[in-house]
Amino acid sequence: MPTPVNKPLKIILGVTGGIAAYKIPMLLRLLKKADADVQVIMTPSAERFVTPETLSVLSEKQVLCDFFDPATGMWNNHVDLGLWADAILIAPATATTIGKMVHGIADNLLLATHLSARCPVIIAPAMDLDMYAHESVTENLKTLESRGVHIIPAEDGPLASGLSGPGRLPEPETLFAEFMKIMNPELPLKGKNIMVSAGPTFEPIDPVRFIGNHSSGKMGYAIADAFAKKGANVTLVSGPVSLQTPKNVSRIDVQTAEEMREACLKESTNVDIIVMAAAVADYKVETRAQLKIKKEEDLTLSLVKNPDILQELGKAKTSSQTLIGFALETNNGYDYAKDKVVRKNLDFIVLNSLADEGAGFGHDTNKVYLFDKTGSEKAYPLMSKKMVADIIVKQAISYHFSGNFADI
Ligand code: PMT
């Protein structure tokens, strides 16, 4: 018996031209049984595999197949459709539709609606095994995933061609269950308090100048966002950056390492997971000039060490807290990161190295290695900071609840 949808969920069910379209009437029945309001949009070639009449009867609505209604000549407004939907589910999604989605092609009503939509998009690819394994298709799927499209993977089994292998559309019950899981994500961190630090600190020299670094805050903000999406109460202690506060995150702005220390120590007393992604300046000038230093002779600044916030958090860590640090290195990254895990009493550390192209400061991408206090290691390829944040959050959840890395 399907799980009922709490309020009528408005779903665009996109059907594209593959033999697996024969399963869609059953999927549609399950969605309707769960009280969803379903608008079916078919691509022209889908009509060869399942009739609009069948889907119209089951959805209790006219099925849309074209930009213009052939009977009335009325425009089927893809912009309104895209904005109306709470979700777009495309099943089966053929290699052609997937490729066109990647390239922003809008040569049918379904593709144009997809481009206008602001809601989650879920696709269930289905095709013959060699097509599904083809590099162009796997790359296209990766691209869509990196843009936030949810993919319900094809299953392994007998195919219409007579061959057998991965490419089969999952059964309607599985498609329905996967779709509902995506639409009603579990919130494993509901009620948990999380603190994330992000961005640089600026250490003033005089009222005009400061010592800083290149941190944009992107990595830490993506982590705060990913935690909030898991239902946590997230506090973001942020150095000076020009980024928008992620939804459902409360932000404390600081400038200097001392201010960041004060905010972090105050917030940390009641948190379950801490991630220090900020690039805290290790040094500050010993005496800050009250007036602008005039340009005369060469100037020598005397620098003193800033407090190591992470180390202090490690000392104060309680048995129920999970503490995660970052290590930004240019050389000998593995050794330095492993040393920091132990020395700063961390559960695990995220190493990113400026020796890796596309990793570290400023980029939208990062390449990270995780080391935990027991010697376990994980290495990940270069990917978007959003994807890195999702991995760090999944590993933080796994560590918090089971004391181990998850198998991802
Ligand atoms: O902000 P982006 O442009 O997206 O770039 C992301 C990033 C490169 C800043 C981020 O991924 C990162 O590596 N942050 C940590 C940078 C850093 O300061 O590394 P570190 O190896 O010097 O410090 C080790 C750890 O101690 C870090 O968790 C740091 O937050 C913490 N630390 C460092 C110095 C200090 N005085 N107090 C601290 O708490």
Image: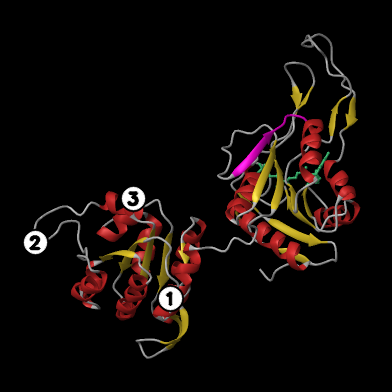
Residue 270 sits above or below residue 70 on the image: above
What's the residue at 81%, 62% (across, down)? 372
* Residue linked to disc 2: 71
Distance from Cα at disc 1 to Cα at disc 2: 36 Å
Q: Which mark is residue 372?
A: none
The reply, left or right, for residue 360 in relation to residue 128 is right
**What kind of secondary structure does the magenta stretch mostly adopt?**
strand
Amino acid type for the residue under numbered disc 3: Leu
- Circle 3 packing at 10 Å, graded few (<14), some (14-19), many (20+), is some
Q: Which residue does the numbered mark 3 point to in the structure image? A: 83
Residue 160 position within the rendered picture, expressed as x and y whole percent measured from the top left = 35, 86
Frontmost residue, 348 versus 45: 348
Q: Which residues are magenta?
A: 249-256
Q: Secondary structure at mark 2?
A: loop
Label 3 – label 1 distance at C-alpha: 26 Å
| Sooner in the amino-acid sequence: mark 1 or mark 2 | 1
Look at the numbered disc 1 and give the secondary structure of its residue: loop
The amino acid sitting under disc 1 is Pro
The answer to whether the beta carbon of the residue marked 3 is less than 8 Å from any atom of ligand 1 is no
The type of residue carrying mark 2 is Ala
Which quadrant of the view contains residue 244?
top right
Label pair 2/3, CB-CB below 8 angstroms: no
